Amino acid sequence: MAKNHGAIRHVALLIESSRVYGRGLLHGIAAYAGEHGVWALRHQEMAINAEPPSWLRKWTGDGILVRAETPTMVRVIRQLALPAVDLRCWKSAGVIPGFDTDDQSVVRLAVDHFRDRGFTRFGFCGFGGANYSERRLSEMQRYVRSLGHDVAVYESPGPAHATTFGAEQSGMLDNKGLTRWLHSLEKPIGVLACNDIRAQQMLNACQEIEIHVPDEVAVVGIDNDDVICPLCSPPLTSVEPNTHRIGYEAAAMLDRMMNGEIVPPEITWIPARRIVVRSSTDSIPVDDEDFVKAYRFIRENACRGVSVQNVADAVPMSRRALERRMRTHLGQSPADVIANIRLTRIKELLETTSRPLKQIAKLTGFQHDEHMAKFFKKLAGIPPGRYRKKYRSESNADR
């Protein structure tokens, strides 16, 4: 029986906060709950593949938002006969309504990014047995083949219907197979990993066997994990799902269900939000060894305050030859390339951290934050502090 609209809703959140995806969902749910009446939220911290907590079987609340990875979790939720929405959409498919990320949008963002960088070879690295990995592989093969190319594929051996955690552990134990595959690839190539953890495993393997990223193998992950991506070497480009929107819309659906609306057990697919570009794809795949060396040096040292002469000395080549090569391949002067890399890094730090401007200045090669602010305003058109506020305001509106 539907309860009176406006009454306090007791909602269980069986969603992990240890992963960026789960945290994004929780932020979206909290935003909806804060805007629409009074919800008493009971959050159970748990691993993504956890079984139901002991209290759940006798719980007498109003609704459940869950990331269900086990048949037992789905069975217990169905036995409770409470309104429920699943945000994992695997074991509950066809029996509980759910929300998930649209994999077609994920793949198109990644592949189009590779194409913009000039790549014509594409690969996919996933986890065998993981349903989300298999979906993303299928979408990538469909899209890349429509463009007239094929996909080089590697999936670590794993159990059928593997949980997220189980698939990731299988990948950790499969370094030899992964390195053999990386060696065998025709290069340069852009590779999409099924998630950021798989991408990190790839980057570690590339480093171990001295395959240069991104000039030989460019790598894109999925989830834009704010811990994993910056820790990767080099920092990982990643597709960012719109988890805030997923959480918000799932909460809205649960609210309607708690008010008596009958919702069919279907999955609503939400497009990914954007691709966040970092150094793992910052490459121009051209057959010019001196240019590649110069560009690589700029990419790795621009935020240390290097000069054009430093670049010419490092390759080495004359400043005139350096200027000619940069304009031929990038359409920019060496000074412009250095400036744009520094600008991109400043924007990334403003968007993704709360670091004060003084720290951002030091991290991008400026001795004083006033110099950094002047540089930023000249190229971006607004002061860095205003840029940060504007970005966060637009991000919240988009979500």
Image (tube, rainbow, N blue to C red):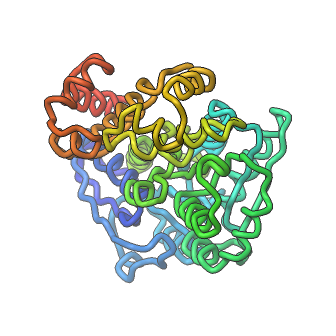
> Residue 310, located in which quarter of the rendered image?
top left
Residue 44, x across and y down, in percent: 33, 70
Residue 322, x across and y down, in percent: 54, 28
Answer whether residue 268 is visible to the viewer in this image.
no
| Residue 338 falls left or right of residue 88 | left
| Residue 127 falls left or right of residue 70 | right
> Residue 143, located in which quarter of the rendered image?
top right
Measured along the vertical axis of the image, is residue 195 above or below residue 108?
Answer: below
Measured along the vertical axis of the image, is residue 240 above or below residue 77?
Answer: above
| Residue 196 falls left or right of residue 358 | right
Residue 56, x across and y down, in percent: 39, 75
Q: Which residue lies furthest to the bottom in this view?
A: 54
Question: Who's the residue at 29% across and 60% down the image?
Answer: 10
Number of marks:
0
Question: Who's the residue at 32% across and 49% down the image?
Answer: 27
Q: Nearer the viewer, residue 97 or 137?
A: 137
Residue 380, x across and y down, in percent: 32, 21
Quarter holding the N terminus is bottom left
Quarter holding the C terminus is top left
Answer whether residue 211 is visible to the viewer in this image.
yes
Question: Who's the residue at 44% across and 46% down the image?
Answer: 300
> Residue 129, located in which quarter of the rendered image?
bottom right
Q: Nearer the viewer, residue 239 or 378?
A: 378
Question: Who's the residue at 36% across and 62% down the image?
Answer: 13
